[in-house]
Amino acid sequence: MGLTKTSTGAGAAGLRPAPLNPGPQDRVIALAGNPNVGKSTIFNALTGLRQHTGNWPGKTVATAQGRCVHRGCAYILVDLPGTYSLMPHSAEEEVARDFLCFGGADGAVVVCDATCLERNLNLVLQTLELEPRAVICVNLLDEAEQKGIQIDLAALAKRLGAPVVGTKAGRGEGLDALMDAATALADAPQPPVPVPVHYPVAIEEAAARLGPLLRQRLAGRLPERWLALRLLEPDKALLDALTQALNWDPRTDLQVQDALTEAWEGLKAAGFNPGTLEDSIAAALVRTAESICRAAVRHTHPDSQSRDRKLDRLLTSRRTGVPLMLLLLAGIFWLTIQGANYPSELLSKGLFWVQERLSALFAACNAPSWLHGALVLGVYRVLAWVVSVMLPPMAIFFPIFTLLEDFGYLPRVAFVLDHAFQKAKACGKQCLSMCMGFGCNAAGVVGCRIIDSPRERLIAILTNSFVPCNGRFPTLIAIITMFFAGTQGGIWRSLLSAILLTGVILLGVFMTFWTSRLLSGTLLKGVPSSFVLELPPYRRPRIRQVIVRSVLDRTLFVLGRAAAVAAPAGLVIWLCANLSVGGMSLLCWCTRFLEPLGHLLGLDGAILAAFLLGFPANEIVVPILIMTYLATGTLQDMGDLNALHQLLVSHGWTWLTAVCTLLFSMFHWPCSTTCITIAKETRSVKWTLLAVLLPTASGMLLCAATAFAARLLGLAPW
């Protein structure tokens, strides 16, 4: 089995992926469906691949492809992005439509949610118009049964004119029957005849006027009735794709253009315009879906949705939604702080025990001291620090984050914050990428692909670093605990630290809103776009899958990327601390040079040098600072916060230094991994530099203003 991913880009033709080298006997089957219906779960179960299947609408913005063998027949399954319609208003919808049109699929499987079948049938009916060789998979039957929803699959198949199979993909039930139906459909000499959607008479006559001309030109490659309807409401992306795929452009075909002109004369005489035409087509699909569901769906418990409605009243209302969100955020931080301390200490001891063994090995081999220093005290020591500091919090934070995603809460967060992002003239989906940034800003930048508007996607990318990633939490937590929560107190200390950390995070969220509004009014002017956000049903999280997914897909992935950067950074840091010029190390020269700027910002030269050398990974800022103050030439670990507090105070730290360091830790340049990711996503040096400048300028201005105000009021010496 194999997996390839094709990223979405601009332009319909560019969104069309190529299948996985199909052999002569391979059948290509497209998996389509609304977001959050279990489509990727079915894909994973059939192909054995570990595709991410979050309870998060619109998350899959790339196609995944895998091989599947069923009863001796080989298949290539193509997991299309979740979409609500094949009349596209987003990149995801273009991907799905273009693959069904031009991807060479032998058939399709349209996955539906049994708990809300009527809404899902809109896509089913559109797909059957385009690809009659389609199997309808009614998934989540187990959830429907719990809610008292009964579906007559035979009646549904009869009304649709297409095969229907019921599945419980989470339990692996019904998948063999699904593949049997797909095989039978692919082997059938003629496709079935699906139920036609009856549009208003004027629209049917306009489509019929185009039908004969299109039949001659398409030669069976696309259904002429479907294309006639699409040509009546011109879509530039589809026309470009037609030109590339079929070597035929309707815009330059005079006969087709004359027929379109006559068709529109008839439509205008019947009172239609381009807006009402689209509405009438959509209304006809809705009416057909309602009629089919009345015959096939029965509700035995009318109040089966009452639990979801009660929870939504709490989690999405303006009065309770925001306070509960803040309380939950503080709880997550408390669990992360409280739970990461002991495993981090154990991991640190183990890794530094390995360092001692490595040092003994170098000594036994009579290796030169500079080689031991560069490789063991430089490369390995920095790497060990990053792993011991990053891994425990991520191993707690990511599973909790994934549990909320699986439960269905994250779309509610986006719903609650959508109004604020609209006020900032940005897209509400930015909330989702911002939440991803708490784990890793690089992952948050990649997550901005879910935003359709290029302008709003760029705003989300440029502001993602205003929320702290997992790598900045250790510095924030240590400073808050030492200077504001106290180094004694056990559980109460960690609780107060979590509350203060939540306040600092809220400042980052506010700065995200403010900077987004600033960009929207200056460099990236525009009107915020609307988007469809489906609130999925609440579901019991699948604990085992959540743990596996969060550890493999997120924790180890982010840790591996940070480690790859931290290892060479360790060598550079060791060289800066050990190479001397004029009797002082390069690090000391750097510290002395930065001292005036540091004082202006309420910091000192050593703090600024630590942030500069911590560019590869934010986790190493504190150990670099300790190394600078102690002048040891290697990273130092002071796990005892009391000892670290005494060291900082002895080097001139005050409450003002702590506040300004907190602010600068929140707002400074993104780490190297995030910068590289921004450059790849924007393909622009200009926007990458702006993404570095925005948080850095914000941090420096906040620090300078805070220091100036404190000194002006006599709260700190000049």
Image (tube, helix red, strand yellow):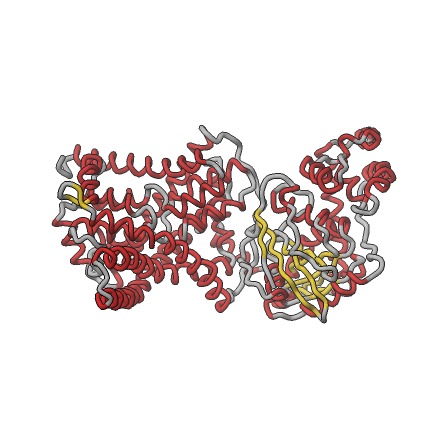
Q: Residue at x 50, y 60 (%)?
A: 407
Relative depth, front residue between 177 and 307: 177
Q: Is residue 267 above or below residue 495?
A: above
Residue 483 visible in rendering: no
Q: Is residue 395 left or right of residue 310?
A: left
Residue 243 coordinates in the image, percent (x, y): 73, 37
Q: Quadrant of residue 150?
A: bottom right
Residue 242 coordinates in the image, percent (x, y): 73, 40
Q: Quadrant of the C terminus?
A: top left
Residue 672 visible in rendering: yes
Q: Residue at x 47, y 36 (%)?
A: 684
Q: Is residue 3 left or right of residue 151?
A: left
- Tag count in the figure? 0
Q: Quadrant of residue 65?
A: bottom right
Q: Is residue 328 above or below residue 218?
A: below
Relative depth, front residue between 198 and 427: 427
Q: Is residue 533 left or right of residue 476?
A: right
Residue 421 coordinates in the image, percent (x, y): 47, 40
Residue 356 coordinates in the image, percent (x, y): 23, 66
Q: Quadrant of the N terminus?
A: bottom right
Q: Residue at x 85, y 42 (%)?
A: 215
Relative depth, front residue between 218 and 127: 218
Relative depth, front residue between 371 and 151: 371
Q: Is residue 248 left or right of residue 342?
A: right
